[in-house]
């Protein structure tokens, strides 16, 4: 399970954009040169004033772009962490919720979840088949669907991304791993609430893609330190990597991807007859996945030819993929094949992070697919993110640096250690269950996109059902689904519902 190869731009959502959500490869020792050895800098805080009109109400805020230092066991500075915070002017800090938000990768900065859709200003994203909008100039506008109406926001860049960097007393092994990353975010959050006197504020975590993995570990670490959380918000979740990245003989991902295949096929009109609705297509696939399909996979090579033929025919009805191909792959269709074959053998390839998007394939015998391994959805929005966020940093927040802002780091992703809870660990669901058990008032929000082929929604449901949560706390888990992909805010038609649901969740979790 350590053979996930990083794909360019896949660090998006995962940034989601993603690959362990992108496709990380085995962890290995990072060379000493990977760490920046400059002297420890001073902490910075560049403050600007802004206003946002959300739900018809004008909110005045202070935006702080700055850094905080992390320290080692001997109180030596090991890393400088960059963040952008939005705090409502004049609000009572005891009553005003505070949400710490981040993207994933691992190796992705948090610009996407900030100007992508949750912050007070947002990028006007290129839409499906809107090629002209993929080119500069781009727009960052007031975000009427920002969750800032419900909570102050602190967007954090993981060490090695954005402007966050390792210092002289630090090294990659301190930060590039599941366990180490959780500890780093725990320390940053505790430092932030101490420096800004927010210890008694209602507190939330919001993570996207690998950021949901980070949510589980960081929540458990914070609760163990006595820092209780009102809620944890998951967007495009992965808590068990075996559910999305299979190994030879492991049939679980094939089963869990089936409903997502059906959703993509419905979206692109590949089903005949076409179900009455997206929900009908998804429901039919879920019923088959948890019954007949799983039993067929369980039989392995012992399945009878007649039974295999019948299963292939039903899979073809659910996904639009021909019976012959289902038989050729022995009823186990890899995601990479599905993405290339859904639109026919000569059709375009659908996106991994958002199946609504498509991109033409290059000649089949060329060594690279169109856009490398990044996929259709990533290539469509990457230009807008890079240009818009750098312009926003310099010209709106007035934060400048001699270093480039690293939206995604292939070095971080390459050297990541999946070492939780043990050397070969890649399952963090039990950590989330333990955090909820020790902090029983904590609420958990699950947000999933039907067209997300990186962290499929059915795999998320499986992970939550198998993380060991005690029955009495199941009522604390709240589920929401949207007609969009991995980056839930990219679809302007889905963003208002997403924001409304998060606002309501925060209000519910902060009932006092």
Image (cartoon, rainbow, N blue to C red):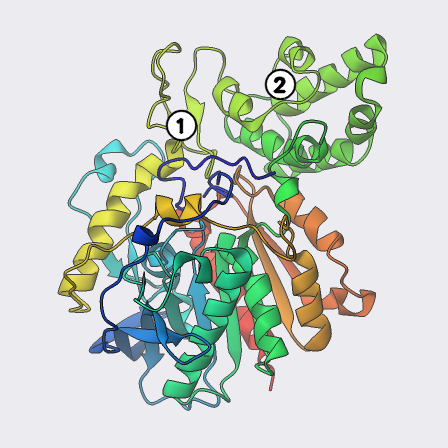
Instruction: Quadrant for residue 81, please give it.
Output: bottom left
- Asked whether, in this view, residue 498 is left or right of residue 257, the answer is left
Note whether residue 103 is visible: yes
- Asked if residue 210 is positioned above or below residue 377 in the image, the reply reads below
Q: Of helix, strand and loop, which one carries label 1?
A: strand
Note whether residue 17 is visible: no
Q: Compare marks 1 and 2 and give the one earlier in the sequence.
A: 2
Q: Of helix, strand and loop, which one carries label 2?
A: loop
Residue highlighted by disc 2: 272
- Asked if residue 78 is positioned above or below residue 90 in the image, the reply reads above
Structural distance between the alpha carbons of marks 1 and 2: 21 Å
The quadrant of the image that shows the N terminus is top right
- Where residue 335 sits: x, y (%)? 56, 28
- Asked if residue 443 is positioned above or below residue 512 in the image, the reply reads above
Residue highlighted by disc 1: 358
Who's the residue at 56% across and 43% down the image? Answer: 455
Instruction: Quadrant for residue 393, please give it.
Output: bottom left
């Amino acid at each position: 399970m350590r053979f996930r190869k990083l794909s360019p731009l896949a660090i998006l959502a995962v940034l989601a954009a993603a690959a362990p959500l992108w496709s990380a490869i085995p962890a290995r020792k990072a060379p000493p040169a990977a760490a920046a050895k400059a002297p420890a800098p001073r902490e910075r805080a560049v403050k600007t004033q802004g206003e946002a009109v959300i739900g018809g109400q004008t909110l005045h805020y202070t935006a702080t772009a700055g850094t905080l230092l992390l320290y080692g066991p001997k109180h030596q500075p090991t890393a400088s962490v960059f963040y952008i915070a939005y705090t409502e002017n004049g609000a009572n800090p005891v009553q005003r919720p505070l949400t710490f938000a981040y993207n994933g990768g691992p190796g992705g900065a948090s610009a996407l979840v900030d100007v992508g859709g949750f912050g007070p200003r947002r990028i006007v994203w290129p839409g499906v088949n809107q090629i002209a909008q993929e080119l500069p100039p781009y727009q960052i506008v007031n975000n009427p669907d920002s969750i800032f109406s419900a909570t102050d926001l602190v967007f954090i860049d993981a060490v090695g991304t954005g402007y966050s960097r390792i210092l002289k007393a630090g090294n990659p092994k301190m930060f590039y791993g599941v366990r180490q990353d959780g500890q780093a975010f725990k320390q940053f959050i505790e430092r932030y609430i101490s420096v800004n006197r927010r210890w008694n504020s209602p507190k939330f975590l919001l993570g996207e893609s690998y950021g949901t993995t980070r949510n589980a570990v960081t929540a458990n670490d914070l609760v163990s330190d006595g820092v209780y959380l009102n809620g944890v918000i998951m967007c495009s979740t992965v808590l068990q990597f075996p559910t999305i990245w299979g190994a030879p003989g492991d049939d679980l991902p094939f089963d869990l991807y089936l409903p997502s295949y059906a959703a993509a096929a419905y979206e692109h009109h590949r089903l005949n007859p076409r179900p009455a609705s997206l929900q009908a297509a998804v429901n039919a696939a879920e019923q088959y996945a948890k019954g007949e399909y799983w039993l067929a996979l369980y039989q392995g090579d012992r399945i009878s030819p007649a039974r295999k033929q019948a299963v292939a025919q039903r899979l073809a009805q659910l996904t639009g993929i021909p019976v012959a191909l289902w038989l050729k792959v022995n009823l186990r269709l890899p995601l990479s094949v599905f993405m290339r074959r859904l639109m026919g053998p000569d059709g375009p390839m659908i996106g991994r992070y958002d199946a609504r998007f498509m991109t033409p394939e290059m000649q089949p015998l060329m060594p690279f697919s169109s856009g490398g391994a990044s996929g259709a959805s990533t290539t469509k929005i990457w230009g807008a993110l890079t240009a818009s966020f750098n312009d926003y940093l310099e010209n709106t927040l007035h934060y400048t640096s001699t270093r480039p802002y690293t939206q995604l780091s292939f070095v971080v992703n390459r050297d990541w250690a999946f070492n939780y809870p043990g050397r070969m660990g890649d399952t963090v669901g039990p950590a989330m269950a333990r955090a909820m058990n020790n902090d029983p008032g904590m609420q958990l929000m699950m947000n999933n996109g039907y067209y997300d082929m990186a962290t499929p929604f059915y795999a998320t449901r499986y992970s939550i059902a198998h993380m060991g949560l005690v029955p009495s706390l199941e009522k604390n888990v709240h589920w929401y689904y949207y007609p969009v992909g991995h980056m839930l805010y990219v679809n302007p038609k889905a963003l208002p519902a997403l924001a409304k649901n998060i606002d309501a969740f925060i209000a519910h979790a902060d009932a006092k």
